[in-house]
Image (cartoon, rainbow, N blue to C red):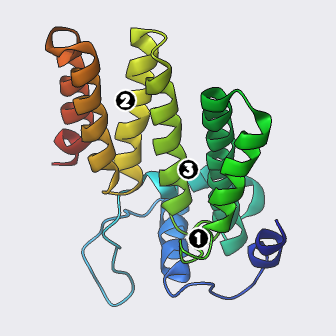
């Protein structure tokens, strides 16, 4: 928490691409195309757009600045911690071990190269993937499985690496539920993920 409070209002880059990522948010808020032809003024990063779109409502409240984008990252990091706590508590029937799971996640901060609290999509990707995994693991209903899979597809739209998690979720659902029950999952994953991308 100390690191986040120390970082969130820091006026300069915490990482070399933060101002470039901020430029993407400002283009969306100005109604400019995000993936325009490269020019001397702007060259789009090769990232999918959902992280920038997640930042838009926060920017309406807090302005288009590094604080806003770091706040979105912090929400993702906090959400990841909550999902880790819930998953570990469910597996161990112990609040203590749930807190230890969150502690291990927090201890890995430096290994993650501090990407969890700066203006990048990494913590949003992680939160969405963990939430999708958590919902699929519950196996309460077909609708909840679809929601978990949709979150995995959303992870792809946050960052391309999310496609690996979406395809992994479909393979897991097929292995767990059988082909007869899982073929709609394949259609959802392919059409809403890479299919829309192409």
Residues tagged 2 and 3 counted as in contact (Cβ below 8 A): no
* Point 50% across, 73% down: residue: 21
Q: Is residue 52 left or right of residue 179?
A: right
Q: Whole-percent x and y of residue 101?
A: 66, 49
Nearer the viewer's eye, disc 1 or disc 2?
2
Judge whether 134 appears above or below 164 on screen. above
Judge whether 193 appears above or below 10 on screen. above
Residue 159 in view here? yes
Nearer the viewer's eye, disc 2 or disc 3?
2
Q: Whole-percent x and y of residue 83?
A: 62, 39
For label 1, the crowd category at 10 Å Cα-Cα, with few meaning under 14, some 14 to 19 and many 20 or more, is many
* Point 35% across, 64% down: residue: 47
Sequence-earlier tag: 1 or 3: 3
Mark 1 and mark 3: Cα distance apart in space:
12 Å
Nearer the viewer's eye, disc 1 or disc 3?
1
Mark 1 and mark 2: Cα distance apart in space:
26 Å
Q: Which residue is mark 1?
A: 119
Q: Which residue is mark 3?
A: 54
Q: Which residue is mark 2?
A: 149
Mark 2 and mark 3: Cα distance apart in space:
19 Å
Q: Is residue 42 left or right of residue 67?
A: left
Q: Nearer the viewer, residue 149 or 92?
A: 92
Element at label 1: loop
* Point 76% across, 46% down: residue: 99
Element at label 3: helix
Figure label count: 3
């Amino acid at each position: 928490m100390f690191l986040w409070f120390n970082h969130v209002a820091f006026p300069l880059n915490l990482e070399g691409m933060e101002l470039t990522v901020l430029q993407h948010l400002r283009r969306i808020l100005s109604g400019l195309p995000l993936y325009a032809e490269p020019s001397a003024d702007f060259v789009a990063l090769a990232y999918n757009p959902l992280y920038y779109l997640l930042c838009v409502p926060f920017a309406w409240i807090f302005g288009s600045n590094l604080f806003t984008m770091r706040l979105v990252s912090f929400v993702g990091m906090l959400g990841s911690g909550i999902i880790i706590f819930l998953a570990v508590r469910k597996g161990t029937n112990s609040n203590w071990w749930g807190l230890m799971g969150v502690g291990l996640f927090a201890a890995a901060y430096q290994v993650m190269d501090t990407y969890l609290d700066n203006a990048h999509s990494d913590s949003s990707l992680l939160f969405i993937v963990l939430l999708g995994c958590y919902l699929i693991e519950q196996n309460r209903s077909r609708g909840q499985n679809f929601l978990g899979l949709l979150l995995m597809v959303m992870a792809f739209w946050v960052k391309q690496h999310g496609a690996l998690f979406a395809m992994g979720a479909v393979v897991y659902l097929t292995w767990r539920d059988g082909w007869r029950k899982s073929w709609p999952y394949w259609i959802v994953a392919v059409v809403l993920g890479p299919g829309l991308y192409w």
